[in-house]
């Protein structure tokens, strides 16, 4: 399963990626809405985890 993690806090984003990768998930990251939007246009994801309090 390929997951996009959209989180502006680097420590939390890294922690999420580390835990999910240990469980066998493929993860990509985005720190902003703009970065996430570009990745979603280019790639297919099975799941997108979005920080609800993401600026912008």
Image (cartoon, rainbow, N blue to C red):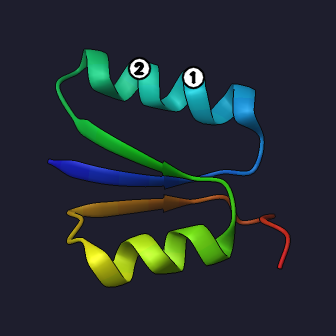
Which residue is farthest bottom? 41
Residue 38 drawn at (x, y percent): 47, 78
Query: Cβ–Cβ below 8 Å for labels 1 and 2?
Result: yes
Tell me: 11 left or right of 36: right
- CA separation, marks 1 and 2? 6 Å
Q: Residues within 10 Å of mark 2 (few under 14, many from 20)?
A: few
- Assign a secondary structure to mark 2: helix
The residue that disc 1 covers is 15
Residue at image position (85%, 70%) is: 55
The residue located at (34%, 28%) in the rendering is 20
Report x, y in % for residue 25: 21, 34
The C terminus lies in quadrant = bottom right
Q: Find disc 2 in the rendering and name its residue.
A: 19
Examine the rendered structure and indicate whether residue 10 appears above or below residue 49.
Answer: above
Q: Residue furthest top?
A: 22
Q: Residue at x 31, y 51 (%)?
A: 3
Number of callouts in the render?
A: 2
The foreground one among 17 and 41 is: 41
Query: In the shown orientation, is residue 18 left or right of residue 34?
Result: left
Per the image, label 1 sits on a secondary structure element best described as helix
Query: Which of 30 and 21 lies nearest the eye of the viewer?
Result: 30
- Is residue 20 depicted above or below 48 in this figure? above
Query: Image point 41% across, 20% down: which residue?
Result: 19
Report which quarter residue 44 is drawn in.
bottom left
Q: Position of residue 6 (x, y in %)?
A: 57, 57
Mark 1 Cα-neighbour bin, 10 Å: few <14, some 14–19, many ≥20: few
Q: Is residue 13 above or below residue 38?
A: above
């Amino acid at each position: 399963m390929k997951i996009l993690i959209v989180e502006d806090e680097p420590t939390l984003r890294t922690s999420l990626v580390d835990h999910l990768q240990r469980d066998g998930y493929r993860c990509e990251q985005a720190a902003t809405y703009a970065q996430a939007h570009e990745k979603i246009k280019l790639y297919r994801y099975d799941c997108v985890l979005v920080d609800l309090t993401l600026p912008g």
